[in-house]
Image: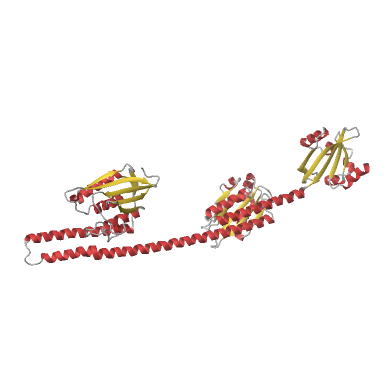
Amino acid sequence: MVNRLNALMKYSPAAILMWDTEMTIIEASDKWLERHKFLEEDVIGKNHYTVFPDTSQRWRDIHQRCLAGAIESCDNDLLYLTNGAVENVKWEINPYKNADNIIAGLIMISEIITEKVRQNAALVRMHRELTLLNRVTDIATKTPDEFDMLENVCKAIEEVGEYQLVWFSYIPEPIKDMQRISPFHKFGSSIHYLDNFYIDLLDEHHRKGPTATSILQNETIAVNDLESNYNFAPWKEKAAVAGLHSSISIPLILENNQKAVFAIYSSEPNAFIADVIEIFERMRNEVVFAINNIQRVHQGKIAQVRRDRLIRELNTRNRSLEEFTYMVSHNLRAKVADLLGISTLVTQPGIGENEKTELINSIKSTSLKLDEIIRDLNSSLLVKGHLMLNTEIIVFKDLIEKIQIKLNTMRPSSRITIQSDFSGLVSVYSDQYYLFEALYQLFVSLSNIKIEDADQVITITSSLQNGKAVLSVADNYNKVLLKGKERPVFEIYRKLYHHLTEGGIKLFYAETIIENMGGKLDVNTDPDSHITFTIVLPLDDEQIS
């Protein structure tokens, strides 16, 4: 038995230590002696607490529980050796008994597992980093917005990678004597480290820092001990307070030569080993590829918008040219022809005074109509070219009263009465002058018909539909049959009423105003051919209903 015990003590790969009930060391294996740098005569026969006077209360309590019959163990504990080294150790303490079945002492078997712990930690870390790489790749390939993509990548580095801090920034071009970099996207439990934080690439001390070096040399820079790194000195104190012990800076260069950088910090020293750096550089490549794609798509969309805008402008100019040509060749030329014809008649011999007076009145009436056409055309072209809005709260009731006064003044013979119902929407936030002009032109257009011995009643109502203000202007007296499709009545050369010779310039003017105000003007007739104009205007939170 003694020979077997001696062999176990000498050749066991584990460290073995035996005590009696008084905690006197009675046996120690060669492995244990080697670990603690003792000879047998240094420990055998001596009390454990004499050999190790700094034994903690935790271990003293473990010894007493085991002497009372308990079995205690630990799969990963820290062992502080006499030379100052710290090792990971797996241990177990068992009581042993004598022939009388009485506890005669304790035996402890321990094994240094530091290397296994390191290997396991490295495997866990690599699994975590590979998971992070997959997550970043997924974000980069599925997020179409550059801001959201970078925001989510930073968040994934902090959450999936379990890092204490990550920030991203594009590198600005030098401005005079300063080129400062400030974090744009940032996440992490140590985010307070970035309070008032910046890196000036033109500053002598900042240029030596790891992030600046990474940018200037286009090289990934890892610092696994921030406290001892001389170049990190300007930020060392804040990093210590934030609990940051290692960092990595990863530069990015895009297709347009725009530079950027990721900076990642860990609370663990030596967090950025070679394998981890390789994974982060692969992650960087995925992000660069994604940003380049997003920017190419964005530039393509901008080019398409510009092309569409140019086409719309060309179409608008072409339509305006056609409308102007028609107006000159029809509306204006017709009135000029009328004037020429009447003036010729006036000069004919044999014209009586009564006939001459009637012809002069015709000249006056035609001239007034010609002047009105020219003024409407000029107003339409001015509005179409430029509309300066002066927004304010417009109370519909007050606006219609002003329109009624103008109608009575300018067209006293029309005998128009406006009936209103603004219970659906009392007011709107818009430009009062232009809304007045648009509505007035609609009322004038509806009044361009002779009504014998009757007043013309035009109704206007308001409502709120789908978050927009809607005004409906209807003539319930006259029966009107629109020619063809409804929309062309807003073109300059279209007519609202079949029997009228006058074109639709007033409706064209009204539609131009409404569209430039961000709204829409439509026209339709009901089964009885009563006509209704509908104005739809944008309505925001500041508008009063």
231 or 484, which is in the foreground?
A: 484
The quarter in which the N terminus is drawn is top right
Q: Nearer the viewer, residue 91 or 426?
A: 426
In which quadrant of the rendered image does the C terminus lie? Answer: top left
Left-right relation of 436 to 450: right
Which of the 4 image quarters holds residue 375?
Answer: bottom left
Q: Is residue 134 above or below residue 102?
A: below
Q: How far from the left and from the top, in percent, is residue 495?
A: 26, 58
Q: Percent position (x, y) of residue 425?
A: 34, 43
Residue 16, percent from left and from top: 85, 43
In the rendered image, the vertical position of residue 343 relative to residue 93, given as above or below = below
**Percent position of residue 9, x then y:** 88, 44
Q: Is residue 250 visible?
A: yes
State the image quarter where residue 80 is shown: top right
Corner quadrant of residue 255: bottom right
Question: Left or right: 104 with respect to 488?
Answer: right
